[in-house]
Image (cartoon, rainbow, N blue to C red):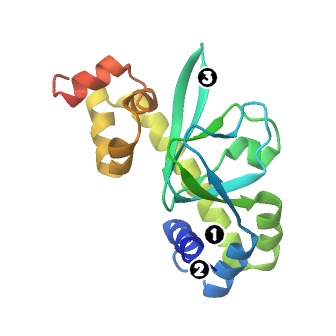
Amino acid sequence: MDALLKETVNAAINSRYPGMDLESRRLIGEILVRKEVEKGEILLNEGQISHHIVLVGKGMLRQFYYKNGKDVTEHFSYEGCIAICIESTLKQEPTHLMIEALENSVIYLLPYNKLLALTEISWEINMFYRKMLEHSLIVSQIKADSWRFETARERYNLLMENQPEVIKRAPLSHIASYLLMTPETLSRVRAGLL
């Protein structure tokens, strides 16, 4: 296993199931497919079926969709993060989400069918898969609650606290759409006017 692959596998697994044994980590590492993507490259388009879970080794990705002709950022992923279009991957149906590289990136594609096969022979990998799905559901609920109950300033402060890499590296227009605000509102929040 090369250094970046090992680092990526360990970071992704440790974020969901840190107790996973070395053999299970090796099994996951063996089925990952390395891919280098350029800034602006679309990894998954609307209407395609997601067959992979993405582990980010280097760089930054965003998941987004179009609503009323506007681009809305759903999620950011960077080193050690896992990106999954959960509905498309689990149901093997076309997605509404798109995945774009915001930076030149190195990603590892985890084939969903191979992961499922490993869950049947490894309790550890099954637990990792379960923890990955649980985390995705929790993140979705937290985001939905944030949109419903928090002010623009509170949403920005939470992003700054929980994902400072996004604030440092993502374009402001994508941060604004992720926080469900206009770029002008984001500018006022950042200036302390809201």
How many tags in the picture? 3
Cα–Cα span, label 3 and label 1? 31 Å
Where residue 192 appears, as percent x and y from the top left, is 16, 28
- On screen, residue 144 versus residue 6, left or right, reads left
Let me know if residue 151 appears in the view: no
* Residue 66 marker: 3
**Type of residue at label 2?**
Met
Give the residue drawn at x 38%, y 44%. Answer: 169
The residue nearer to you, when weighing 16 against 166, is 166
Give the residue drawn at x 67%, y 64%. Answer: 129
Dot 2 and dot 1 residues touching (CB under 8 Å): yes
**Type of residue at label 1?**
Phe
Give the residue drawn at x 77%, y 60%. Answer: 111
The residue nearer to you, when weighing 53 against 168, is 168
* Residue 72 marker: none
Residue carrying label 1: 128
- Compare marks 3 and 2 and give the one earlier in the sequence: 2
- Compare marks 2 and 1 and give the one earlier in the sequence: 2
Q: Quadrant of residue 155?
A: top left
The local crowd at label 3, few if under 14, some if 14 to 19, many if 20 or more residues have their Cα within 10 Å, is few
**Type of residue at label 3?**
Tyr
- Look at the numbered disc 1 and give the secondary structure of its residue: helix
The C terminus sits in image quarter: top left
Residue found at the very far left of the displayed protein: 192
Give the residue drawn at x 60%, y 19%. Answer: 67
Q: Nearer the viewer, mark 3 or mark 1?
A: 3
Where residue 148 appears, as percent x and y from the top left, is 42, 28
Residue carrying label 2: 20
Cα–Cα span, label 2 and label 1? 8 Å
- Compare marks 3 and 1 and give the one earlier in the sequence: 3
Cα–Cα span, label 3 and label 2? 38 Å
